[in-house]
Image (cartoon, rainbow, N blue to C red):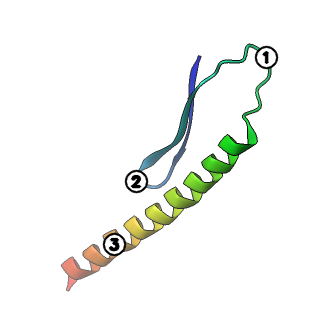
């Protein structure tokens, strides 16, 4: 069964991880995968913050 984890910010959706569930039992993901997802979430947060900053900077330029 395919699955995925995603997060949404103000103007974007980031896909953090996709996987093919192989086990018929249990819902926990292996720790290395959880660590990878956490790292990607931090990267997505940083990217979204920078994108928002850049967008705000462009808007300020248009107002001048």
Q: Which residue is mark 3?
A: 54
Mark 2 nearby-residue class (10 Å; few <14, some 14–19, many ≥20) = few
Q: Which residue is mark 2?
A: 11
Residue lying at 19% horizontally and 77% vertically, measured from the top left:
62
Q: Nearer the viewer, mark 2 or mark 3?
A: 3
Percent from the top left, x then y, of residue 59?
Answer: 27, 74
Q: Nearer the viewer, residue 41 or 62?
A: 41
Q: Any mark on residue 25, and which?
A: 1
Q: Nearer the viewer, mark 1 or mark 3?
A: 1
Percent from the top left, x then y, of residue 5?
Answer: 58, 37
N-term-proximal mark, 2 vs 3: 2
Percent from the top left, x then y, of residue 9?
Answer: 49, 53
Q: Nearer the viewer, residue 8 or 21?
A: 21
Dot 1: what SS? loop
Q: Farthest residue to the front: give it.
A: 32
Q: Any mark on residue 45, and which?
A: none
Quarter of the figure with the N terminus: top right
Residue at mark 2 to residue at mark 1: CA–CA distance: 36 Å
């Amino acid at each position: 069964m395919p699955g995925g984890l995603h997060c949404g910010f103000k103007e974007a959706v980031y896909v953090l991880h996709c996987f093919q569930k192989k086990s018929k039992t249990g819902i926990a993901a292996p720790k290395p995968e959880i660590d990878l997802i956490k790292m990607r979430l931090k990267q997505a947060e940083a990217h979204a913050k920078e994108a928002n900053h850049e967008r705000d900077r462009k808007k300020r330029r248009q107002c001048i």
